[in-house]
Amino acid sequence: MSTDKQRFKSELRQHIRARLEKISPAVRAVESIDLNDRLKPQIASARTILFFAPMPDELDIWPLLELSLALGTNCALPFFDAGEKNYGARLLKSLDNDIVTGKFEVREPAATCEQIALNQFDLVLVPGMAFDLNGNRLGRGQGFYDRILSAASGIKCGVTYDFQLLETIPAEPHDAKVNFIFTPSRCVRRKT
């Protein structure tokens, strides 16, 4: 990747982080409720879902994970495989018993949870620093989710605040795309 694109991505991440830091817990809570309401029809129609554990600055989709487990949906979270230095996915049965703190201080499934292949999902919920109208995603800079998305099956839905949905962001041919982007106020299908 060119140094100009790398610099632009780095500056965009810094700008987004600064805006995320200014969001109050009350605003995050309200916008998370709006987002979860918007996502419920997609969640209800999927049999096997790869969720993500939201970081403190991300919209909180954890209530949808709780609801999906209660409805008997096959739900999984990514986990860091230290041997492979990459992420896989494991199924959850109980949030009380199956969650540990993993790599980067992110909640993930315990080693006792059954592993599931990434090509077994109907729906994949995807975090990001920013998304664009073409389905491109700007991650946190490590490339882990690009590798998850390139191997995962199913409809891929970016989950983000409204201000994180941009007209365009720099992308490389190897960057994985999402099919839809969900914000608290709208759902956008990527341009084809």
Image (cartoon, grey):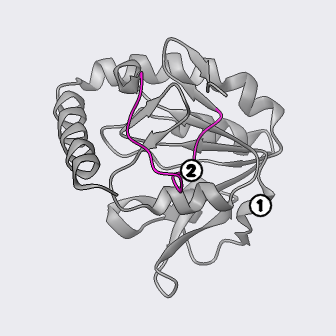
Indicate the secondary structure of the residue bearing disc 1.
helix
* 176 within the magenta span: yes
Report the span colored magenta: 167-179
The residue sitting at 67% across, 28% down in the picture is: 192
Q: Splitting the image into 4 quarters, where does residue 47 fall?
A: top right
Q: Is residue 190 above or below residue 123?
A: above
Tell which tag, 1 or 2, sits nearer the viewer. Answer: 2
Identify which amino acid the numbered label 1 is placed on: Asn
Q: Is residue 115 above or below residue 127?
A: below
Q: Residues within 10 Å of mark 1 (few under 14, many from 20)?
A: few
Q: Position of residue 152 (x, y in %)?
A: 69, 57
The residue sitting at 41% across, 28% down in the picture is: 168
Q: As drawn, which residue projects farthest toward the bottom?
A: 83
Q: Splitting the image into 4 quarters, where does residue 67 fall?
A: top right
> What residue did someone put label 1 on?
119
The residue sitting at 48% across, 49% down in the picture is: 53
Taking depth in this image into account, of 167 and 125 the one nearest to the observer is 167
Q: Quadrant of the N terminus?
A: bottom left
Q: Is residue 166 above or below residue 186?
A: below
> What residue did someone put label 2 on?
176
Q: Splitting the image into 4 quarters, where does residue 45 fall?
A: top right
The residue sitting at 58% across, 77% down in the picture is: 111
Q: Position of residue 116 (x, y in %)?
A: 73, 67
Majority secondary structure of magenta residues: loop
* 37 within the magenta span: no
Q: Position of residue 89 (x, y in %)?
A: 63, 65
Horizontal side, residue 64 vs residue 16: left or right: right
Identify which amino acid the numbered label 2 is placed on: Ala
**In this rendering, does residue 43 appear at all?**
yes
Task: State which tag comes first along the sequence, 1 or 2.
Answer: 1
**In this rendering, does residue 99 appear at all?**
no
